[in-house]
Image (cartoon, rainbow, N blue to C red):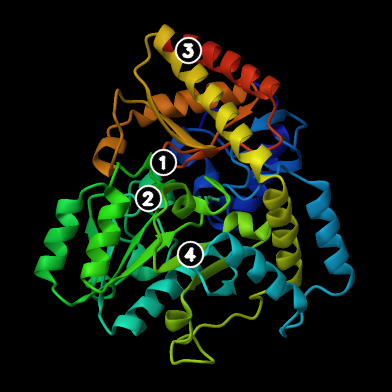
Amino acid sequence: MPSITSRKTEQSRRLQERAARMIPGGVNSPVRAFGSVGAEPLFIVRGKGSHVWDADENEYIDYIGSWGPLILGHAEPGVLDAILGAACNGTSFGASTPSEADLAELVLSAFPHMQKVRFVSSGTEATMSAIRLARAYTKRKFIVKFEGCYHGHADCLLVKAGSGVATLGIPGSAGVPEEFTQFTLALPFNNLGAVEHAFHKFKHEIACVIVEPVVGNMGCVPAADDYLVGLRLITERERSVLIFDEVMTGFRVAYGGAQELYNILPDLTTMGKIIGGGLPVGAYGGSSEIMDLVAPLGPMYQAGTLSGNPLAMAAGCATLKQLRDRKSEIYPRLDKLSGELVHGVAAAAQEAGIRLCHNRVGSMFTWFFTPGPVRDWDSASKSNTDMFGRFFRAMLDHGVYLPPSQYEAAFLGATHTAEDVQKTITAAKEAFAALRA
Ligand code: HOZ
């Protein structure tokens, strides 16, 4: 295994050796093991704004942002104050606390189709619960998901999935009996014909269609024009539940998520990441008619000891309030700076004769090492992942920390500066020159 970078990374190596003796692969989530980019993982010890530092005190411009939650940057003072303030009153009660309704109010006012929301502790719980709820509501068994979309690691959703499973080249998982996925229909993304065909074949049997309205888990792949409208029209006609998985896109591509950006309302929305301000939170919500099926009001059971945890609620409230109050400044700036970054790096690749294409929606983006275009899993999987690995390592060498997988979107946040962007473009020029050598 090559060393991470030409920088000194002895401490990270030592920490990884120690962790690997006790934790599978030394990590608690697979992609951060750096396996697909041919390197050893970094151990991060500190973050501030758009920068992180590893255990050897190397500094990096960070385009992961904890995989999306840290849109306001690392160690944002308002968020830290809120967490510390909540912690001083106790960390968990397993009882209702006032901040749960505070966060609910913020979420519901940003996502008008939602009349009720239930907080859980992760995106996986959110999507798993939303699927169960859709099945309870429609009394149907089949679900439709799309190849390369990732909705967490519930058994029925680990079918042709993106993110870590795609990164490892195992888009399903051992330990999931085929009977558990027999009602999951995995269709090509951005292909309405396939959806029509499925509804024709399984008439009155499909409980829901779940989709990342901007895919982040095969890299960033936007929906084609009219695709989401098409999904809305088909699901409405077929009385099937449309679920937008906005774990990544909620409060990211617009304050009101992809549904605000594209003006299309789903029946259920799942969320995570930003709504927890860097602490573990997920959520699912929709109309009262559907949500009132959730226990204790209704027969669909779902629960959690740490659901609505007061520290996580406080971090989420502090983050959403800032985004709400500064949205007319933050989102246009994120869009502009991300555009400059993505185009600057793409231009550097072109100059160096490297075949690369890019996708971007607001501050979510990916450079794919293929001429493209990338519009579904078939085209995403044509990317040259060896080249991506070399690019990733060269960028790390120049102090730029990108997602360690071709199949994860990168994120820019409110604390990234024009200088960060310029430095990243310069790093990319040098990385591409090295790639050609
Ligand atoms: N699967 C998550 C991102 N889409 C987390 C990756 C990780 O932390 O390993």
Label 3 residue SS = helix
Q: Is residue 196 left or right of residue 365?
A: left
Q: Earlier in the sequence, mark 4 or mark 2?
A: 2
Would you place residue 434 above or below residue 12 in this image?
above
Judge the density around disc 3: few (<14), some (14-19), many (≥20) Cα neighbours within 10 Å.
Answer: many
Judge the density around disc 4: few (<14), some (14-19), many (≥20) Cα neighbours within 10 Å.
Answer: many
The amino acid type, in three-letter code, at marker 2 is Gly
Would you name the residue on which mark 3 appears?
Answer: 348
Would you place residue 109 above or below residue 324 in this image?
below
- At x 64%, y 81%, the residue is 305
Q: Is residue 206 left or right of residue 290?
A: left
The residues bearing labels 4 and 3 have C-alpha atoms spaced at a distance of 37 Å
The residues bearing labels 4 and 2 have C-alpha atoms spaced at a distance of 17 Å
Ligand 1 contact, mark 4 (Cβ < 8 Å): no
The amino acid type, in three-letter code, at marker 1 is Tyr
The amino acid type, in three-letter code, at marker 3 is Ala
Q: Earlier in the sequence, mark 2 or mark 1?
A: 2
Asked if labels 1 and 2 touch by Cβ distance under 8 angstroms, the answer is: yes
Would you place residue 152 above or below residue 293 in this image?
above
Observer-side mark, 3 or 1, equals 3
Q: How far across and down, in percent of the image, does residue 322 sit? A: 73, 50
Q: Is residue 204 left or right of residue 320?
A: left
Label 4 residue SS = strand
Label 2 residue SS = loop
Q: Where is residue 60, by image quadrant?
A: top right
Q: How far across and down, in percent of the image, does residue 87 sit? A: 84, 68
Judge the density around disc 1: few (<14), some (14-19), many (≥20) Cα neighbours within 10 Å.
Answer: many
Would you place residue 41 above or below residue 358 in this image?
below
The residues bearing labels 1 and 4 have C-alpha atoms spaced at a distance of 21 Å
Would you name the residue on which mark 4 appears?
Answer: 270
The residues bearing labels 2 and 3 have C-alpha atoms spaced at a distance of 28 Å
Asked if labels 3 and 4 touch by Cβ distance under 8 angstroms, the answer is: no
